[in-house]
Amino acid sequence: AVIETYGGKVIPSPSDTTEIGRKILAETPNTGGSLGCAISEAIEVATKTDNCRYVLGSVLDHVLLHQTVIGLETKIACEKYDIQPDIIIGCVGGGSNFGGLIAPFMGDKLQGKNNIHFIAVEPASCPSLTRGKYAYDFGDTGNITPLLNMYTLGSGFMPSPNHAGGLRYHGMSPLISKLYHDGYIEARAYEQTKVFEAATLFARCEGILPAPESSHALRCAIDEALKCKETGEKKTILFGLSGTGYFDLSAYMSYNNGSMTDFIPTDEDLEKGFASLPKVE
């Protein structure tokens, strides 16, 4: 509504305005789409339109580099107020927000300067880290991008249409994937009703309506705080509140009226996506 108010045009993906969009709709007519679908369509439009360039907003290394402004500002604030985080938590879809948040702290950890516990939180309906495979895969559904070495559910994986909590991407940033593969970060997956429960509690306590994506990190932060309450341990928990929920009011309405449901893919569901992985020697 805001974009169209300023004269822009919004086309939901997958659409019938591109070749790859029509192909995806023909193969999966009831799909709710994914970030992978949107990337494929955006690249196709960019390559067929004069004076047009496409800039990917997540996943790739240079995007994480830009996002480190989040972590750098956070680290400076921690040093200024003498805060030593024990746990740092962020949501992950493609990985750029989480990667940007943890990068300066992770750099210190790799040099033995801290012992912070890093937790990446993803949706249970799109669990690329917790249930994906570490493999070379395409970054988009249409298989246009170069191959990326990452944790992935396969470029052919489609998130459930009832998934309203964001983070709808089949793969994970190669940098985040490498850190996870080498044991430097933990990954957790949450159902969306638990995520919105945490978001609602936070809104009522803090007066801030968090984005559904951010609320994955929030859910984990609350769980870690409750764990400390049970054990009597004192820990400093830092989490990334990466966005506002005012562009996701329909998702909040779905949770509030009880129509929101959870979907956790079966191993059989995931195998369909894994079958799309390219054969790399």
Image (spheres, grey):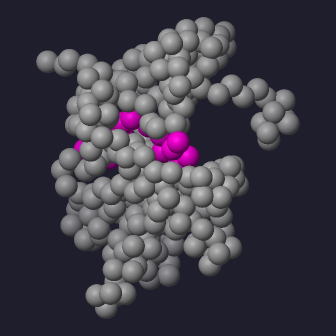
Q: Is residue 86 left or right of residue 123?
A: left
From what the image shows, is residue 120 above or below residue 158? below
Residue displayed at 14% across by 18% down: 281
Residue 157 appears in the picture as rendered: yes
Magenta highlight: main SS: loop
Instruction: Give the camera-side residue of 114 and 129.
Output: 129
Residue 146 drawn at (x, y percent): 36, 20
230 falls in the magenta region: no
Q: Which residue range is magenta in the image?
A: 162-178
Outermost residue to the left: 281
Q: Quadrant of residue 13?
A: top right
> Looking at the rendering, which quadrant does residue 135 occupy?
top left
In the rendered image, residue 9, in percent from the top left (x then y), is placed at: 76, 26
Front residue of this view, candidates 35 and 42: 35
Q: Quadrant of the N terminus?
A: top right
Q: Is residue 95 above or below residue 224?
A: above
Asked whether 201 or 241 is in front, the reply is 201
Q: Nearer the viewer, residue 111 or 274?
A: 274
The percent position of residue 158, horizontal first and vertical second, equals 43, 31
